[in-house]
Image (cartoon, grey):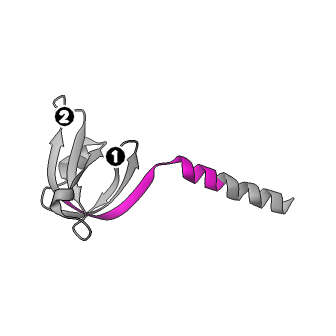
Amino acid sequence: MKKTFGLFIILFTLILASCGGVSTASTLMVIEKGQSSNNKEYWIKAYDPYNQNKEEAFKIMIQEKMVWNLIEEDKEYFALYSKKGDNLRVLEDIQH
């Protein structure tokens, strides 16, 4: 019974982990900030200065305007972001 329960927990954890998107934690250099014309979507363009060139910068969506307001261009941050769907990256956490 204990082996069956343990196996169930392991399988459940693996299935749950495979359902989510891919999360990445890295250092980011923010090179640009922007927002949609209706001020409902906020984003930054950034790249990992230790693994990428400035030309390889990618867009990360910011869900809250307050967070977007605190981020500065040409500053380095440590960030956690997830990739969902077709190259849509969403910021989960950011630290200076």
Q: Residue at x 82, y 57 (%)?
A: 4
Residue 26's place in the image compared with 90, above or below, is: below
How many other residues sit within 10 Å of disc 2, few (<14), some (14-19) or many (≥20)? few
Q: Residue at x 69, y 59 (%)?
A: 10
Q: Residue 27: where, in percent of width, then height?
A: 28, 66
* Magenta residues (range): 13-30
Front residue of 5/56: it is 56
Q: Residue at x 16, y 43 (%)?
A: 34
Q: Residue farthest to the right?
A: 1
Q: Residue 96: where, in percent of width, then height?
A: 24, 64
Q: Residue farthest to the bottom?
A: 50
Q: Residue farthest to the top?
A: 38
Q: Nearer the viewer, mark 2 or mark 1?
A: 1
Q: Amino acid at mark 2?
A: Ser
Q: Is residue 52 left or right of residue 6?
A: left
Mark 2 lies on residue: 36
Quadrant (top left, top right, bottom left, bottom right) of the N terminus: bottom right
Q: Earlier in the sequence, mark 2 or mark 1?
A: 2
Q: Residue 14: where, in percent of width, then height?
A: 62, 55
Mark 1 lies on residue: 87
Q: Is residue 34 magenta?
A: no
Residue 37's place in the image compared with 59, above or below, is: above
Q: Residue 79: where, in percent of width, then height?
A: 31, 60
